[in-house]
Image (cartoon, coloured by chain):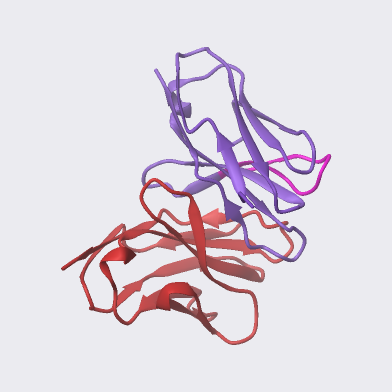
Chain colours: A purple, B red
Amino acid sequence: NAGVTQTPKFQVLKTGQSMTLQCAQDMNHNSMYWYRQDPGMGLRLIYYSASEGTTDKGEVPNGYNVSRLNKREFSLRLESAAPSQTSVYFCASSTGGNVHEQYFGPGTRLTVT
Amino acid sequence: AQSVTQLDSQVPVFEEAPVELRCNYSSSVSVYLFWYVQYPNQGLQLLLKYLSGSTLVKGINGFEAEFNKSQTSFHLRKPSVHISDTAEYFCAVTLVDSWGKLQFGAGTQVVVTP
């Protein structure tokens, strides 16, 4: 039981390049989330998926797209990376509904030069 | 919309001393409240949560928090810290019917020294 896994752990991109961050959970959770963490700002929600087949914008969605590939997997795509997207990205999952405990992955540290 | 304020960005504390981390929130509707801990280079781990019922909530690793609705606060305490409690602590809030969309505070870095 691996919980929430994320790949890659580290990535360096040049401005304008694209990439996809992968997230998978093996807890049969319904809801999945993508956050970014920046110093002094805590975590901010980028996108979430309340259930398989649905996605919605969070607080800071600009410059990102997501895909809920199936119940297990939720990917985050940067189409044209910008230096402002340098951050640590966390994926999380939860049972959903009235159960609000979220389980977090280990994070992806992304640097855009 | 709800918001969360963690009043201290860094809290230095000696080993075996007590620690209190302060968290205030603002919301016009009912909320659920959480404290998460992040050890260096790791993801976040839930310490404790308040959903309803008793306002004193006990969590893992000897931590507890008290929900105070009139003060809109959810302060975290531990009576005696260990070196291993060195970490960043995040307070978070979600609206009762918001599908778990968490609003995080900026975090409090706790540094425990011998």
Q: Is residue A86 left or right of residue A55?
A: left
Instruction: Please indicate, yes or no, whether residue A59 appears anywhere in the rendered image.
Output: no
Q: Is residue A107 left or right of residue A50?
A: left
Residue A81 at x, y percent in the picture: 52, 19
The image shows residue B54, relative to residue A2, as above or below, that is below
Residue B58 at x, y percent in the picture: 50, 80
Residue at the left extreme of this rendering: B114
Q: Is residue B111 left or right of residue B32?
A: left
Query: Which quarter shows the C terminus of chain B?
Result: bottom left
Question: What residue is drawn where x is 42% and y is 41%?
Answer: A38
Depth order, front residue of B41/A86? B41
The stretch of residues the image draws in magenta is: A45-58
Residue at the right extreme of this rendering: A53
Question: What residue is drawn where x is 69% and y is 37%?
Answer: A74
Residue B4 at x, y percent in the picture: 49, 60
Residue at the front extreme of this rendering: A1
Instruction: Please indicate, yes or no, whether residue A96 appears anywhere in the rendered image.
Output: yes
Residue A63 position by quadrant: top right
Depth order, front residue of B62/B95? B62
Query: Which quarter shows the N terminus of chain B?
Result: bottom right
Question: What residue is drawn where x is 27% and y is 79%?
Answer: B18
Taking the magenta stretch, the answer to whether it contains residue B93 is: no
